[in-house]
Amino acid sequence: MEENKSVEEVTEEKEVVSKNFIENAIDKDLADGVYNTVHTRFPPEPNGYLHIGHAKSILLNYGLAEKYNGLFNMRFDDTNPTKEKVEFVNSQLDDIKWLGADWGDRLFFASDYFPQMYEGAVKLIKKGKAYVSDLTADQIKEYRGTLTEPGKEDPSKGRSIEENLKLFEDMKNGVFADGEKVLRASIDMASPNMNMRDPVIYRVAHMTHHRTGDTWCIYPMYDFAHPIEDAIEGITHSICTLEFEDHRPLYEWVVKELEYPMPPRQIEFAKLYLKNVVTGKRYIKKLVEDGIADGWDDPRLVSISALRRRGYTPESIKMFVELCGVSKAHSIADMAMLEYCIREDLKLKRPRMMAILDPVKLVIDNWEDGKIEMLDAANNLENPELGNRQIPFGKELYIEREDFMEEPPKKYFRLFPGNEVRLMNAYFVTCTGFEKDENGNVTVVHCTYDPATKSGSGFTERKVKGTIHWVNASTAKQVEVRLFENIVDEEKGVYNEEDGSINVNPDSKKVLTNCFVEPALAEAKAYESFQFVRNGFFCVDYKDSKEGAPVFNRIVSLKSSFVLPKN
């Protein structure tokens, strides 16, 4: 052992800090002097709502900037006005802020750089690196060739620089109709990378932009605009998903040909995939348009706004992303892992309340009529810091229908004729009888209670094997509760192989209107969450709840099928 050092100090010094491949690359760039800082960005297109996969990119980019004491930009890639809306801009900002990514005053839009992008295109034309093409989209595709055959040169490629400059200016001035002309980069029609075969970098589109209005009728293509945005903002590491790996040579070509002094470095990582979950924007849009989902924030979806509405927390999503890790290898996570994360996050934070979702009345025959006793109950047995609350107890209660059986099987320890159980936080009761309606359904269970068995009294003369929860009938609040399952029929998989439609689970949403909760829950506010004894974690729906009339969404049940892997 080193002199004058404790075992703990030596162990700490020798501990190897595990880093992902992106952090290793950044460390090398900093050590080699390629960059002297770290500057990242999250650049969504405002053409839909963000989902759980975007959360990985948001937290990764923001987390890297935080870890290296660098800068983080929030930037919208708003170069396609045909699909973009202010609604999507606002929803994405709300989601990103909710996740905890703080961009401060560093909010940018690609449309802010349209003048620089236009000048960049002009510069390429002057260098002989871009030309105006007359080919249609179908012809360009035909001329591009295949993975095994080179493409053919565009007949327009021989135009002079002066002619290209004039035609490009005419494109900008609205002389041409949509699709009549495009500007292509002049690279290599025989390149083994299809993205380098003279890609289109500008197209004519007479569309009103949500920020620039009708100022422009030409718009840059994403592959041209994105590297320019990064370079202008001084991004050092452009972290994106693996689908852009084949686009990296074009990214590097653009920043090199436009002679930016400190070109950004693009690094790709594997997307976050969830098994049997719909994440694609066009599929979610179809579910919304067909009325299957009640909006982009339907709690059965995994858009960030839907997860928030259902009751997931930023901390649980961050935990999930960290468990999934960052790598180059594609992998598919199970929804059970995400459910594990929200259980872990909420179990010590939220109060444990009593709610009856399928009620049957229980009458304590030897309880004094009209008497209400206030009982003491811990808010969370695992976290005493949450304190206690007072709950009313009286002659008539509601219990779960499944907690009584006329003829129980073996090892059924709840209520049945002659059996004694504890009412949670209250007394021992013994079932003395029951009533049924004309259809044979139990409507009332009768019991007697033992006054000596009050919870907390120290009673030890006998024990019971069953404890059931309850609410006091006269003070309970009737509420609506929604139970959710996967919107996808998991046995069939997400997509129908014949027509590509989604295999919808018809039982993915169950609405219960005859539920009763403790009176304190009547004042619960939007997004507040609770553990309902034995029924799971629930959150107050922000959209359909009204003051004094909360609607509760089940976030997740209490049972988990996920086992945290051992290191």
Image: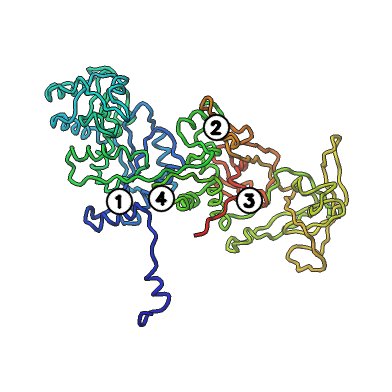
Label 4 is placed on what type of residue?
Answer: Val
Residue drawn 32% across the image and 49% down it = 72
Q: CA distance from mark 1 to mark 2?
A: 38 Å
Which residue position is annotated with label 4? 326
- Mark number, residue 559: 3
Is residue 67 something that shows in the picture?
Answer: yes
Residue 80: x %, y % from top left: 33, 29
> Which badge, 1 or 4, is on the more N-terminal residue?
1
Is residue 518 something that shows in the picture?
Answer: no
Q: Quadrant of the N terminus?
A: bottom left
- Mark number, residue 342: none
Which residue position is annotated with label 1? 71
Vertical relation: 217 (above or below) 341 = above
> Tag 3: Cα neighbours inside 10 Å, few (<14), some, or many (≥20)?
few
Vertical relation: 434 (above or below) 491 = below
> Which badge, 2 or 4, is on the more N-terminal residue?
2
Which residue position is annotated with label 2? 294
Q: CA distance from mark 1 to mark 4?
A: 20 Å
Residue drawn 60% across the image and 39% down it = 485
Q: Which one is in front in this view, the residue at disc 1 or the one at disc 4? A: 4
> Which badge, 2 or 3, is on the more N-terminal residue?
2
Residue 435: x %, y % from top left: 86, 43
Disc 1 vs disc 2: Cβ atoms closer than 8 Å? Answer: no
> Which badge, 1 or 2, is on the more N-terminal residue?
1
Label 3 is placed on what type of residue?
Answer: Lys
